[in-house]
Amino acid sequence: MSSQKDLIAPADPLNLENYQPERPDWTIDQGWERYTEQEHATWRILYQRMTKLMKGRACALFERGIRELPMDSDHIPNFIELSERLNKHSGWTVVAVPGLVPDHIFFEHLANRRFPSGCYIRRPHEMDYQEYPDVFHDIFGHIPLLMYPLMGDFIQSCGKAAVKAHQLKQTDLLERIARLYWYIVEVGLVQEEDGIRSFGAAIASSEKEILFALEDESPNLVMFDHKRVMRSEFWIYDLQQTYFVLKDMNELIRIAQLNLEAIATELADTPDIELGELIDEDQVLQRGNLNYHEQKQLQATAA
């Protein structure tokens, strides 16, 4: 097991550490006309690869969203055109941002049914896994499920709760909301009639992670429990040591109605659960061997 505190984030490919936004909400113009043919080709390859891989691996609602939106398979979508289609279904729109934005800015957008998406697309050598979210992750991974209230309302509820927590300077609550969001929206799995399926955006947009989460013996698979998840550390820059599995997608309705402030207060004196750690209360579906992360740790130590 390891703690998030022991890990170092990789270098941001966009070098946004000292970025000064021109707009208070950090939005920018997508600049769709500036994409090169190589960048569109990268989107096309990723789209074809992931729509093929998701068959029998992605949840039914995600596959339905891909069909019903629909999404451009040949070119990086134009956010204005995509927003028009998405808004008719669910009231959500897509706004362009430079990359990762401050948490309070991110959640403010979600609270108002605006999904912030980066414009950068990964390089050809990063096809199977990209440490930082790019436009393929943000659009292909997130937008299909934002078609439906199950996910759209849940994400908005996280946004509203986080905005309130930021205003009241409740940093512990903000962290626990971020954990809930991460383990559901980004790396969530769900039990369906024909087996465990993925719906998290980080998994849906990564060849490496969809195979790892569903077919590798390394990660733990644990039935979802909201208090357990809100105690669990997370790390966004690598494959997960533990994935949590919803009993069905309708569970998102119940989670969206939770009093997160009250739960955070209840959990205030409980210790965090480190990456890869299992606890006695866990309903374990797969006790992972954690080989992937142990090998990475050994390599880092040797270096």
Image (cartoon, helix red, strand yellow):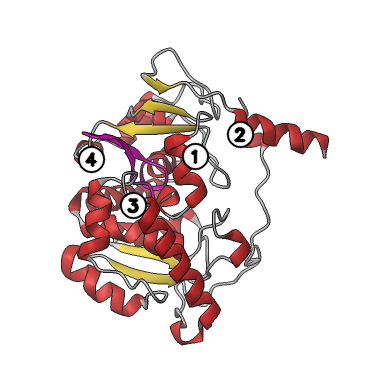
Disc number for residue 32? none
Q: Residues within 10 Å of mark 2 (few under 14, many from 20)?
A: some
Three-letter residue code for mark 1: Phe
Residue that badge 2 annotates? 292
Query: Which of marks 4 and 3 precedes in the sequence?
Result: 3
Left or right: residue 255 versus residue 119 is left
Q: Residues within 10 Å of mark 1 (few under 14, many from 20)?
A: some
Q: Position of residue 223 (x, y in %)?
A: 34, 26
Residue that badge 1 annotates? 212
Which region is colored magenta? 184-200
Extreme bottom residue here?
Answer: 33
Look at the picture and state if 23 lies above or below 130: below
Residue that badge 4 annotates? 249
Q: CA distance from mark 3 to mark 4?
A: 19 Å
Query: Judging from the image, what secondary structure is the residue with disc 3 in?
Result: helix
What residue sits 24% from the left and 40% below the top? 252
**Do the numbered discs 1 and 2 sit on residues whose CB atoms are within 8 Å?**
yes
Q: CA distance from mark 4 to mark 1?
A: 21 Å
